[in-house]
Amino acid sequence: MSYGFDYDLVIIGAGVGGHGAALHAVSCGLKTAIIEAGDMGGTCVNRGCIPSKALLAASGRVRELRDAHHLKSLGIQVDNVAFDRQAIADHAGNLVSKIQGDLTNSLKRLGVDIIRGWGKIAGTQKVTISSNGTEKTVTAKDIILSPGSVPFVPPGIEVDGKTVFTSDQGVKLASLPEWVAIIGSGYIGLEFSDVYSALGCEITMIEALDQLMPGFDRDIAKLAERVLITPRDIETKVGIYAKRIIPGSPVVIELADFQTKEDVDVIEVDACLVATGRIPATKNLGLETLGIELDRRNYIPVDDRMAVLSGGEAVPHVWAIGDATGKMMLAHAASAQGIVAVDNIVGINRVIDYRSIPAAAFTHPEVSYVGLTEVAAKELAQAEGFEIATSKSYFKGNSKALAENESDGMAKVVYRKDTGEVLGVHIFGMHAADLIHEASAAIANRQKVQDLAHLVHAHPTLSEVLDEAYKRALV
């Protein structure tokens, strides 16, 4: 333990990132405390990754069992498939409780002090914790900020938590509206459209930008749209934004053209999910006591060692990880950042490699990617003076996918023409979220398609989709 301090490390925020940092800190011999004012586990465990995947698992089974054509092709017949909305909601709630308990117990078991209350920096190597009108101060050699994020609600949208709500309330599945509008077609909007459509809701998806799934590679997005949206009871409005949303029965949504801002329509629906992204929870952290200023988007500025920056220089003994840094709003990215921060605290020089961190939407089928999109790779190539190439393979030619009769999908590899280095991999199809990790490892090690093409994959497996894409790059 560092001489003269209460703790070697104090972490503000017990989400997945803070939890991962705490576990690693203990393994490095640091006396550690973690401060949390809300739910242990943060957004991911309580309002994000975990409950949403439980809902997707249950609704996905309903979709599969109700797909009579697909089952018949396998020689199976199932009649009168029914579900209990509350039981599905309870499945998600029970999973949250279990994982929240597991996370808390793992910290206690390793001797991490869990301090309940609002933590904020009170000066150099000092943190105050406020709880129920009382306040105490602890000292720490190092401080990690991991405050997370909250849903972004655009101006003009009134959220009542019942008829107009964000993903925070949506994961509770308190009701199944006959007609639900979803504002946004990113990860959150896509996953909820998957849940709602499987359980019989009619959907209107409203995307302000000029194309659906704007953050995804365009080839993948086009195919995903044909499979995940077009054949389902989902109406889409692109280049249109919700100028005003009024909760009630019905919910009134005033729509306008995103470019011209001219009014275009008014629709009335039973409910509306606002899935317009997330913003950092960076207020009231005491940053001003150390002269730290948030960037223009209210994120905490950090370098790739996760040190907090002030005027471009690292602030001694202050680190930040997770959504509040604005780098990658993913739970596993926060965990990776936490490990990097702790390593640097104990003198192991390490930087984060964002390009090799994968992401996924757990729709049916799934979407996943790691590295650069083709557009981003072209921009990099132009800036650095090289050319890129792409190769694709399809699930329709994969024996395992054909055996499952789940052959919608594609894998796409983006690589440098000169060296063959893989810059990005994008997959849409069955188990895409699991398949992407081979590509993630390849990018982390800066491997070349020439080498990857000679790896041997088990047959018949879905992983051969990537194998084929690598081999096609050599043709």
Image (cartoon, helix red, strand yellow):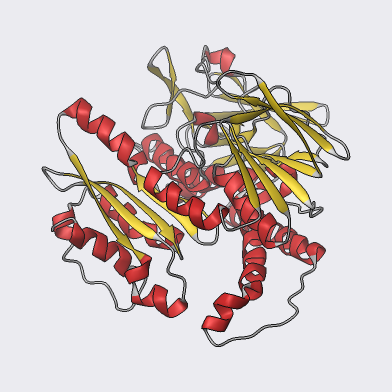
Q: Is residue 193 left or right of residue 170?
A: left
| Residue lying at the far bottom of the rendered structure | 75
Q: Residue at x 21, y 26 (%)?
A: 383
Q: Toward the viewer: 207 or 424?
A: 207
Outermost front residue = 264
Q: Position of residue 164 (x, y in %)?
A: 78, 38
Residue 382 in the image: above or below residue 408: above
- Residue 410, compared with residue 244, is above or below; it is below
> Which one is nearer the viewer's eye here, 49 or 245?
245
Specify the farthest residue to the right: 249
Image spot of residue 311 (x, y percent): 41, 12
Which residue corresponds to the image point at 64% horizontal and 50% vertical from the top-left? 234
Report whether 447 appears left or right of 199: left
Q: Residue at x 63, y 70 (%)?
A: 61
What residue occupies the far left of the structure in this picture?
418
Residue shown at the point (77%, 62%) measured from the top left: 90
Vertical position of residue 120 compared to residue 53: above or below: above
